[in-house]
Amino acid sequence: MGLLNDARLAAGKAPLGFLNPLLYAHPAALNDCVAGVQQGCKVSGAPVDGFAAAPGWDPATGLGSPSFPRLRDVVLALP
């Protein structure tokens, strides 16, 4: 996110503020994690598989991993 702010500042724009609305408004700027399991869950002290990723939702971030080039395009298009 710091690199996105650097790109905006270099373009003469203000830095980004609270990011959640921006990220949820542009899910295509993130890489959709469609496989994998969030590890570390325990039931009665015994480790079990956690929450599994699915298309459109990832248990670690809810959105997926950031794609810098796509996010840079999004934030530079903002006023």
Image (cartoon, rainbow, N blue to C red):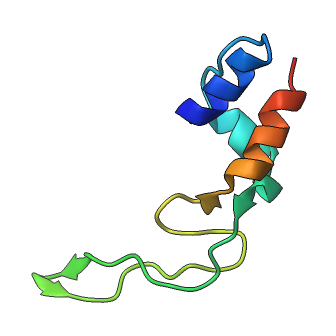
Residue at the far front: name it: 10
Give the quadrant of residue 44.
Answer: bottom left
How many badges with numbers are in the image? 0
Q: Residue at x 13, y 88 (%)?
A: 46
Image coords of residue 65 (percent x, y): 59, 61
Which quadrant of the structure image shows residue 37? bottom left
Residue 4, position in %: x, y?
65, 33
For the residue pair 39 and 2, the one nearer the viewer reads as 2
Q: Does residue 73 appear left or right of residue 57 in this picture?
A: right
Point 20% across, 82% down: residue: 43
The residue positioned farthest toward the left in the image shown: 45
Residue sitting at x 50%, y 82% = 52
Q: Can residue 24 be seen in this view?
A: no
Residue appearing at x 84%, y 41% in the figure: 73
| Quadrant of the image containing the N terminus | top right
Q: Is residue 37 above or below residue 28?
A: below
Q: Is residue 35 depicted above or below 57 in this figure?
A: below
Residue 62 higher or lower than 35, as above or below: above
Q: Quadrant of residue 25?
A: top right
Where is residue 79 shown, x and y percent of the image? 87, 17
| Residue 56 seen in render | yes
Query: For this view, does 23 lie left or right of residue 74?
Result: left
Relative to 51, residue 18 above or below: above
Q: Where is residue 51 in the image (x, y as percent from the top left)?
A: 44, 78
Which of the pair 65/49 is nearer the observer?
Answer: 65
Closer to us: 60 or 65: 65
